[in-house]
Amino acid sequence: MAFAKDPTGGAFVPLTHAYLAQGRFMEAMVVCKKGIKSQPNNVEGRLLLARVYGEQGKVPKALEELRGLLAQNPKVAAAHYQLGVMLDKSGKGDEAVESFKEALRQDRTLADATAALKGKGIDWSPGPSPEEIAAAEAARKAEEDRKAEEAKKKADEEAARQAEEARKAAEAQRATQQASAAKSRAMGAAIQQPRGAVSGPVSGPAFPTMADPSFASTSGAYGMFSGPVPVAAQGRRLGPGFTFGLAALLLLVIVAVVVILKSHRDTQDKITYHLKAAQKQVSSDTTAGHKAANKELEEALKLDDEQPLALSQHALSLSILANQRGEKELDQAAQDATKRAMKYASEQPGSVAAEMIWLRQAGKGDEAIAAAKKLNADELQLPISARIQLGRTYAALKKVPEMIKVADSLKDVPDSGAQAFVGEAYRRIGDQNRARAALDNAMKNEIDHDPSRALRALVILEADDTVHFNVAIDDLNTLKELGKDAVGTRQRGYASLGLAVMGARLGRAEAENKRELETARAALRTDAEIPQFESKQALDAGDLDRAIASAEASIAIDPVRLQPYLQIVEAASRSRKWSKADEALGRAAGVFGDNLDLGLAKAARLRDDEKYADAIASLNTLKGKFDVAEVYRDIGKVYMRSGDLPKAVDVLKEAAKKVGTRAPSVQANVYTWLGRAYADGDAHDSAVEVYSQALAATSDHASTYYFLGVSMAALKKDGAAREAFDKYLRADPNGTYAEKARQRRGSL
């Protein structure tokens, strides 16, 4: 057989197909795995292995293989389609629909994906392809060029017509002048002829000539009685003074007006060109886009330094770069541009948005809000640029409900800048799932949107979301690769901070982590992210006093971020500093009001203090406001801590019923806690079954593998236990259970 002779060749693919056709799944899996081992980048082989797993009913394994393939090559349409099929089989209809749609985005001719969507009653099209969009843009530009050329031709024709009319008028005027001159000559000649006598010839003139001889050469130039009008000799002209009349003057005026109008039109065309180019760049809201836009706007302002749109956008782009992207060297230029924009273009939304940025930075938040309301008293109808700055101003003023109201008004706007603000606002109140969704949307709108990419990585790290560590790593490395021209100084600082945190988590060399952290400090200076993540690392390392101190430093810089308060509560509870925990909870409640994560933290503090009845009462109250899986999960955790495992299992089952609408990572977490409750009661078979549901939700939930290994070891399935511990250690080598996993793995 070809495969036996050369397992590194492509023969394993048809052989696997043959085994599948005969229903020999085990042989198909063995052959396919061997082939992929020798050819790890063989897309067809990996798709086939996923299909083998699917045929065997091993949906979690199929999902894991497909996700691995897509992480390696995200443009494989067939993989997105097959992932949708597997997700559908695991009961995740909404995620399946998104996978089918993504398959069609990659290959709009994929009939299977279209059929799968129609089978769900969804008639969906991915819209025009990039090539079609480019062709349409080229056609639009060609049409614009054609219309511009046609308009220019008409203008030239009109100018020529006017010039011809002026020429004809001048000729008519000259003819009139010549006729008048001829008449004058005739009359002059008649006057100077001798008058006729009554009888006989007269030897001298009847009347003496009155003109002085010295005027003979100019006689006729001062009136009809001053002598004959001089007539040019044939073939000679007397000069322009005798032929340049009113019509000629009119012609010069017309020509001058035409030249001036054409020059003005050309200038306006150039300004329009630069404004359009700038708008195209600005629409991306990337750092590179704002920098490129400023070059176009500066060219427009050279042609007209009071052009309102150019002044407005120039001020806003400079202000965004200086204030929100960390390009501090642009501070003065941005403030100067804002003053000029407010002088000549104060009604433009961009001018107002730029002014709001600097008013907010100066601690004049109320003035910033007043400036916004001059544009529109209904703040939810403000232009997007001003509304974004309004939301940030509310955050600076600790007006959280108002901030969220603005964010909610922008959450469906297909604008990367708006979505980045929405993600930022939700992150502030601890709603990391909605923050992630908004930041993902921003990236869908503009793949190179550096603020969203940086913030998404930090949200993943902040939430300790091991499921999406691979996304965070990709985001951080991409920001580094794009470089300083395409990424803001602040965003590059976030990338270095994230790489330092992730490096420590994944066991990278200490020197590299330290270098990245120092780079982050230099870029971010007094940014609240630095002490917040220092607090988190201290908390993970068990240095609870340092965790509290660093979190307090973060709050001092930016008090409207829930996470540092939660870190203080956890560190204080673990060190049994109950008054400190309660004080942090009180301060947070004063800023954030009713809040799911704050309510969960309060119950956890009571649980850690062994006030189980109070903790359950607090969670039951919270359940009345937030009837979600996480509340039921934490009630179950309290029962587990108190030793009431039957109640813990019952409540965690309720949590599992409600988890369908939550993010995959939350689903996996809830199922893992239910499995742990079963395992604590020695029901390891049930625990393993529930762990498989957790891994079906997402195969990247690291802690599930650790607890699966514990149950497998209890069931004397040492091979499966070793595999589970190995997967945990690969996913999270320095995680909470890493040391225990190594010990248990070594004892098998």
Image (cartoon, rainbow, N blue to C red):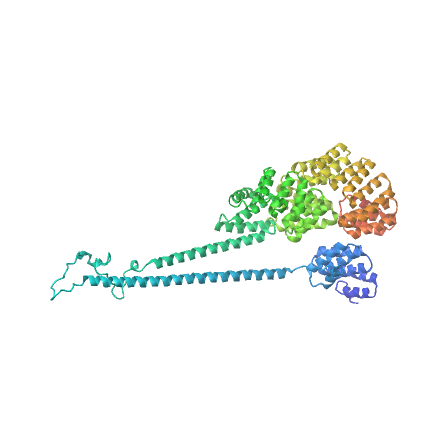
Looking at the image, which residue is at 78% across and 57% down? 88
Residue 420 horizontal/vertical position (percent): 65, 47
267 left or right, relative to 730:
left
Tag count in the figure? 0
Residue 207 horizontal/vertical position (percent): 15, 59
Residue 67 horizontal/vertical position (percent): 74, 55
106 left or right, relative to 655:
left
Would you say residue 278 is visible in this rendering?
yes
Quadrant of res 524: top right
Would you say residue 37 is visible in this rendering?
no
Residue 221 horizontal/vertical position (percent): 24, 57
Residue with the most extreme front position: 198
Relative to 185, say whether 321 is above or below: above
Between residues 403 and 46, which one lies in front from this camera angle?
403
Image quadrant containing the N terminus: bottom right
Looking at the image, which residue is at 47% across and 56% down? 265
Between residues 188 and 739, which one lies in front from this camera angle?
188
Between residues 623 and 481, which one lies in front from this camera angle?
623
Quadrant of res 548: top right
315 left or right, relative to 391:
left
Between residues 743 and 358, which one lies in front from this camera angle?
358
Looking at the image, which residue is at 40% across and 61% down? 163
